[in-house]
Image: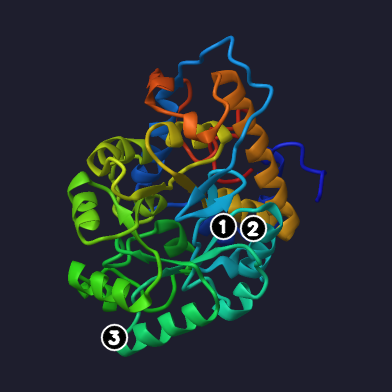
Amino acid sequence: MTTQYPTNEDIIRAAKRNLTQAGWDYLVGGTESETSMRRNRASFDVKGFRPRVLVDVSTLDTSTTILGFPTKIPVMLAPIGGLVRIHPQGPVEAAKAASEFGVIQTLSSVSGTELEEVASQNDQAKFFQMYIQGDWDWIKKLLDRVNKAGFKGLALTVDNARYSLRERPIRYGTTPQGLSPRTPGPGAAATWELMSKIKEYSGLPFMVKGIATKEDARLAVDHGVDVVWVSNHGGRGLDHGMGTLDMLEEIAPEINGEAEIVADGSILRGSDVVKAISLGANMVTIGKLQGWGLAADGHQGLLRVLNILEEEIISAMALLGVTSVKGLNPSYIRSAQPVTPPHEFSSWVNMPENRIV
């Protein structure tokens, strides 16, 4: 594993050097005013810790499970569409890092690499994320491939009925051809009934990704999903949405253990992971951090990202007085005042609030 990056800030700077401006903006940007993206970050920044002391933390356990599959830390690799824009072998390099470190990769159906090639590089349990891009015959053929390749869970993304206005790619002319709010794709007609049909046909543990309200969380549970994935698409879907932890705090009590919960959106530090787990998530996913690690140094860069996250999680748990992930709960969290304006680099004190670092 590479040790030339002391912190994830160093990873980010290396990623910026290696990416084109278009590639960089694709990775770090959001939709329109990027308010949803910044609210994701703000939702973490307005939460503080309530540590307990004189607890024996000489032994800590950061491991957990999702859908019964073990992970070294409560972090999965988020599905990233067009990951080959970040690294030519990005999906395969991410698979190698997930397998070596001991976390679960969720492969996007639009990652840019054939799913069979990625699956062959990962000995760990792996999940597949699906966008609806065709008719029922297209869906069945894709799901047959997913099962044959050995994926252990299926996530259906449901918050992308139409493509949003992502102004950074628009400026560089890098928006994928044919994608526009004016041109609805097959996913625009998706319903709960189609979701249930996909769930039943796949035969896999099922996750519905893109739940932002307790009403839809309840519908998901009533339709028998195994995992409610709390997400606003990383701020790349609806602008002016609510932040990650705001959605989670609304949804977790509604579900109340009837399904597992995954959360994503601006999770950039181990302390963010601990906050999300404390407030009801079983697992979180990383997107930007994953992309920065891959852009910096392929799977070795991503391994370094994961190791730093693990150290940050250990530090936060130990200083909170918590010895295992299962011991995290809302009593360790309270509201607090933010100290920096929220933006994509506000987790690192030396990073400027701009797009060129």
Residue 350 vs residue 233, the one in the foreground: 233
Question: Counting residues from the N terminus, which is met first, the one under dot 1 or under dot 3?
Answer: 1
Residue at x 64% of width, y 58% of height: 98
User: Going by the image, does 76 lie left or right of 5?
Assistant: left
Q: Which residue is mark 3?
A: 136
The colouring scheme, among rainbow, by chain, secondary structure or one colour, is: rainbow
The answer for how far apart the CA atoms under marks 2 and 1 are is: 6 Å
- In the structure shown, which secondary structural element does the residue marked by tag 3 occupy? helix
Task: State which quadrant residue 225 falls in.
Answer: bottom left
Q: Amino acid at mark 2?
A: Ala
What amino acid type should be assigned to the residue bearing mark 1? Ile
* Count of numbered circles on the image: 3
**Label 1, on which residue?**
104
Q: Height in image: 25 above or below 7?
A: below
Question: Where residue 16 sits in the image (x, y, percent)?
Answer: 66, 51
| Residue at 76% across, 37% down | 6
Task: Tell me if residue 28 comes above or below residue 184 in the rendering.
Answer: above
Q: Answer with left or right where residue 308 lies relative to residue 223.
A: right
- Residue 78's place in the image compared with 13, above or below, is below
Coordinates of residue 35 in the picture (x, y in percent): 34, 42
Which amino acid lies under the numbered mark 3 shown in the image of this protein?
Trp
Q: Quadrant of residue 192?
A: bottom left
In the rendered structure, which disc, 2 or 1, sits on the residue that comes first in sequence?
2
**Residues tagged 2 and 1 counted as in contact (Cβ below 8 A):** yes
State the residue position of label 2: 98
The residues tagged by marks 1 and 3 sit, at their Cα atoms, a distance apart of 28 Å
